[in-house]
Image: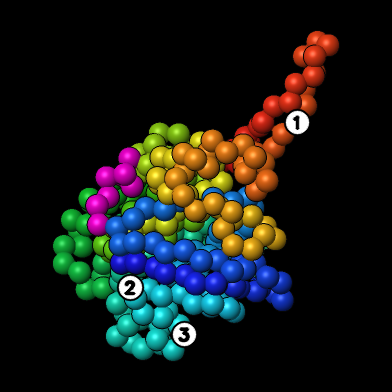
Amino acid sequence: MSFSLEGVGLDLGGRPVLRDVTFSVAPGERVVLLGVNGSGKTTLLKALDGLVVPTAGRIAYDGAPLEPRRLEEPAFRRRFRAEVALLFQNVDAMLFNPSVADEIAFGPRQLGLPGVEERVERWAAAFGVEPLLDRPPFELSGGEKKRVALAAILAAGPRVLLLDEPTASLDPASAARLVDFLAGLADTTVVVSTQNLSVAEELGARALLLAPGRPGLLHDGPSAALVADERLLVESGLAHRHAHRHGAAEHAHFHVHDAE
Ligand SMILES: Nc1ncnc2c1ncn2[C@@H]1O[C@H](COP(=O)(O)OP(=O)(O)O)[C@@H](O)[C@H]1O
Ligand SMILES: [Mg+2]
């Protein structure tokens, strides 16, 4: 399943959030979306999920325009919702079932998929939430909620994963497990946002970079090249340069501050 964006602009509250964004994602490709707070990562992922509508330009899904009129057609809507899953940055907005088991079963039941019990077991195990299956999601920690939300969307078998800062609030072992899981996915198209430079390369070999108030993408290419490009990291706000005194000598250092 592919996406193609051409000159996408999106205003929110009368202010431009995305301007002139152009890129394509091939079926099965894994792309990491980088940018500081307010650079438009969440807005872009919501636009790919059809939840917000561009004010300029075009988004195509699988070769055909992704527009409100088409999303209102029941057959396309059902297909699109079955194929494309968005992990919200704020997972509280996604969890509403009385137990973790019901939360994971919800998508498969809605879609009428077979083997709901097996799916719950498999995906609870994949994200290490088996001990939480009888708990109400609202009382879990931030990281636990995120793992439950991931299990819930994957249990429904999506072909496209849109993940909004999935490693934020995960402990290092859970984050590593997620990275390994994503690396092992075949045939799933993934767009994953982060502001954590230290996981960027592991999340995807190709990186897209947004910066607040800047049109277009500041980078669309290998993640390794972006992570090595100090000038671009400073320019986009993902790293900054400051001077330190070491005894009599003053040195300039680049600092990368991981927000997670
Ligand atoms: N509903 C909204 N109304 C007005 N402005 C918004 C709204 N949602 C987001 N914004 C603004 O859009 C910009 C981009 O936000 P967002 O897409 O959440 O960026 P990121 O996910 O990279 O932090 C921010 O300046 C934010 O304040
Ligand atoms: Mg965001």
- Residue 219 showing in the rendered view: yes
What's the distance in space between the residues labelled 2 and 1, CA to CA?
Answer: 45 Å
**Viewed as shown, does residue 152 lie left or right of 166?**
left
Secondary-structure class at tag 1: strand
Q: Position of residue 116 (x, y in %)?
A: 20, 62
- Which of the two marks, 2 or 3, is nearer to us in this view? 2
Q: Which residue is mark 1?
A: 242
Q: Tell me if mark 3 has few (under 14), some (14-19) or many (20+) residues whose alpha carbon lies within 10 angstroms of its own.
A: few
Secondary-structure class at tag 2: loop
Q: Which residue is mark 2?
A: 62
Q: Mark 2: which amino acid?
A: Asp
Q: Position of residue 111 (x, y in %)?
A: 26, 73
Along the line of sight, the residue nearer the viewer: 245 or 177: 245
Counting residues from the start of the chain, the first of labels 3 and 1 encountered is: 3
Q: Mark 1: which amino acid?
A: His
Residue 85: in magenta span: no
Q: Mark 3: which amino acid?
A: Pro
What's the distance in space between the residues labelled 3 and 1, CA to CA?
Answer: 47 Å
Q: Which residue is mark 3?
A: 68
Q: Residue at x 42, y 60 (%)?
A: 162
Residues in magenta?
A: 180-187
Quarter of the image that includes the C terminus: top right
Secondary-structure class at tag 3: helix
Q: Given contact means CB atoms under 8 Å apart, are the residues at marks 2 and 3 in contact?
A: no
Residue 182: in magenta span: yes
Q: Position of residue 85 (x, y in %)?
A: 37, 64
Along the line of sight, the residue nearer the viewer: 194 or 229: 229
- Above or below 209: residue 81: below
